């Protein structure tokens, strides 16, 4: 395949990764922005989303679409409930102290990982996509008769991958609308800006924190349900999303939703393109180097606010 | 109406309030005076439930507010204008007002009332509150508290750093609230403002409420100002 079609393929693969990464990192960024909690268990919430998706899809059986839709509803909801329990059991009790919450979420991350290993096992298990037809993509070249379109051999994408990109875009827009236009979004933003004054205006900050922590974990689980028909569920699958989410959140600017989405596109696309043309390891090395540059030259990230 | 009965509170091991008592009555302005660090702002925070009491109690009518969780206190009808305004800087003027309205489920009528009170805010509804001038920020902080239709209004140094026309606007608003039967608790450093506005003056010293008197009595005994405020 020529370079052009090859690049198009890499961009599509990168877009799938960017879409899922944007959702995952958004959860991490939301939790940090509102609660000032660095959730080290975020990757394990992602993993739990995928594993629960496999259980739900297997239990419902029937057509893959039934299992997938069931997983899309149940897995994020269950993971959100688990996260709210973690908030109630640990984070609230340590007064949301930044250091103590890091230790607590590391601990819960290991607990979730080992419980999954004991119950789910060490195998990687697939969830069938609800649909998976192959769509040939056109390419163009300038021939004797001007611009000509044709379908190069091997230049195709599955309909499910396009669905993942579209679904993530819809979810991100929906999330932005929720945050900027709804009452609960206003309450979250007010809490993020000034916890004490929010309380003085009747906002139950502890309840908002529980909802935000559940929502953040639910977003990670949602991303995992979308990707599990492509990548399979495995008890160690939370590591890469956690690392990449931290990279995205640092580059985008801690707590900045806009920065998170822009950085997710940057990292996801570059990860996809470099992985296709060179190797996935090189992609991770470059992303990590990018973080180092950002930390040195623009510590607040692309859209973060400079500390006063 | 709002009664503080020998309250003690502080920040962790640091005891700031060691015995503050007073009663703010409906339709009256009670001014808290004292030197920096005496405990005036801490008293306001304790009333709002933002600091747990070590002992004593705070009641509003028949309700003991000091046993309520902090977010339930404003719902009893206590509006708070904190020192330094503490606006939600990243939110627009309209959103700051909406937060105030949400507290007690007030609607369009209350919103129109506060915007009529501060017409300048109506022109800035979509502007981020952190970009407003100091005077406009104080208007917004006051408007946000009035959105609760409070029976008690706490104002912590509302005229700090404002130009004279703005100070007059805040004083007019306090007068309107008093006329409407609101109990106003005011922390204020300007003696002439206290003497003009207050119905009662409470001096706080080292975390204790020392003396309660009328402005007329204070005019007669200037030594008290020297003693408690250093003027």
Image (spheres, coloured by chain):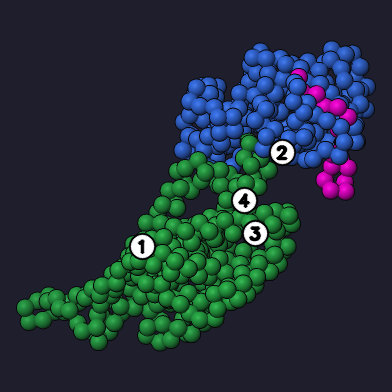
Chain colours: A green, B blue
Residue B79 position within the rendered picture, expressed as x and y whole percent measured from the top left: 66, 29
Task: Find disc 2 in the rendering and name its residue.
Answer: B69
Are dots 3 and 1 in contact, CB under 8 Å? Answer: no
In front: A302, or A167?
Answer: A167
Classify the position of the C terminus of chain A by image quarter.
Answer: bottom right
Instruction: Quote the CA–CA distance across marks 3 and 1.
Output: 30 Å
Residue B200 position within the rendered picture, expressed as x and y whole percent measured from the top left: 81, 18
Label 4 Cα neighbours within 10 Å, binned few <14 / some 14-19 / many ≥20: many
Q: Earlier in the sequence, mark 4 or mark 3?
A: 3
Task: Find disc 4 in the rendering and name its residue.
Answer: A209
Instruction: Quote the CA–CA distance across marks 4 and 2.
Output: 15 Å
Residue A135 position within the rendered picture, expressed as x and y whole percent measured from the top left: 23, 73
Return the mark for residue A294: none
Q: Is residue A216 at least partly visible in the picture?
A: no
Task: Find disc 1 in the rendering and name its residue.
Answer: A66
Residue B10 magenta? yes
In front: B222, or B156?
Answer: B156
Identify the subunit bearing mark 3: A
Eye-nearest disc, 3 or 1: 1
Look at the magenta stretch and give its main secondary structure: strand
Q: Earlier in the sequence, mark 3 or mark 1?
A: 1
Q: Secondary structure at mark 4?
A: helix
Task: Find disc 3 in the rendering and name its residue.
Answer: A86
Magenta stretch bounds: B1-16
């Amino acid at each position: 395949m020529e370079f052009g079609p090859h690049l198009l393929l890499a961009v599509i693969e990168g877009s799938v990764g960017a879409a899922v990464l944007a959702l995952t990192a958004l959860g991490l960024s939301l939790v940090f922005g509102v609660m000032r909690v660095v959730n080290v268990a975020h990757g394990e919430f992602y993993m739990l989303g995928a594993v629960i998706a496999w259980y739900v899809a297997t239990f419902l059986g029937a057509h893959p679409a039934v299992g997938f839709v069931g997983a899309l509803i149940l897995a994020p909801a269950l993971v959100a409930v688990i996260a709210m329990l973690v908030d109630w059991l640990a984070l609230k009790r340590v007064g949301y102290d930044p250091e103590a919450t890091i230790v607590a979420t590391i601990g819960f991350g290991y607990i979730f990982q080992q419980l999954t290993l004991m119950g789910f096992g060490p195998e990687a298990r697939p969830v069938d996509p609800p649909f998976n037809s192959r769509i040939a993509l056109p390419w163009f070249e300038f021939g004797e008769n001007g611009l000509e379109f044709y379908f190069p051999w091997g230049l195709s994408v599955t309909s499910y991958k396009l669905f993942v990109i579209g679904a993530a875009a819809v979810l991100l827009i929906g999330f932005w609308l929720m945050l900027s236009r709804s009452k609960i979004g206003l309450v979250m933003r007010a809490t993020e800006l000034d916890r004490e004054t929010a309380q003085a205006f009747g906002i139950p900050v502890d309840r908002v924190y529980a909802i935000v922590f559940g929502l953040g974990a639910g977003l990670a689980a949602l991303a995992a349900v979308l990707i599990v028909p492509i990548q399979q569920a495995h008890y160690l699958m939370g590591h890469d999303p956690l690392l990449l989410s931290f990279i995205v959140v640092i580059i985008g600017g801690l707590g900045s939703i806009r920065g998170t989405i822009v950085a997710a596109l940057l990292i996801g696309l570059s990860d996809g393109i470099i992985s296709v043309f060179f190797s996935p390891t090189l992609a991770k090395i470059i992303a990590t180097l990018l973080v180092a540059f950002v930390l040195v030259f623009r510590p607040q990230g692309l859209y973060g606010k400079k500390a006063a | 109406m709002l009664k503080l009965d020998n309250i003690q509170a502080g920040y962790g091991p640091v005891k700031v309030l060691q015995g503050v008592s007073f009663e703010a009555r409906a339709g009256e302005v009670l001014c808290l005076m004292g030197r920096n660090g005496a405990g005036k702002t801490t008293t306001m925070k304790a009333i709002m439930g933002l600091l747990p009491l070590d002992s004593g109690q705070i009641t509003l009518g028949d309700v003991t507010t000091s046993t309520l969780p902090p977010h339930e206190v404003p719902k009893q009808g206590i509006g708070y204008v904190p020192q330094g305004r503490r606006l939600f800087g990243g939110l627009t003027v309209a959103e700051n007002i909406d937060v105030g309205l949400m507290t007690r489920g007030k609607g369009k009528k209350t919103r129109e009332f506060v915007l009529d009170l501060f017409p300048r805010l109506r022109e800035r509804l979509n502007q981020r509150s952190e970009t407003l001038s100091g005077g406009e920020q104080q208007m917004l902080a006051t408007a946000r508290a009035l959105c609760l239709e409070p029976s008690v209004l706490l104002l912590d140094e509302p005229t700090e750093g404002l130009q004279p026309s703005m100070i007059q606007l805040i004083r007019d608003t306090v007068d309107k609230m008093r006329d409407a039967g609101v109990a106003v608790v005011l922390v204020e450093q300007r003696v002439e403002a206290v003497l003009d506005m207050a119905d009662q003056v409470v001096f706080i010293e080292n975390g204790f409420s020392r003396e309660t008197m009328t402005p007329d009595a204070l005019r007669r005994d200037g030594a008290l100002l020297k003693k408690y405020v250093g003027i």
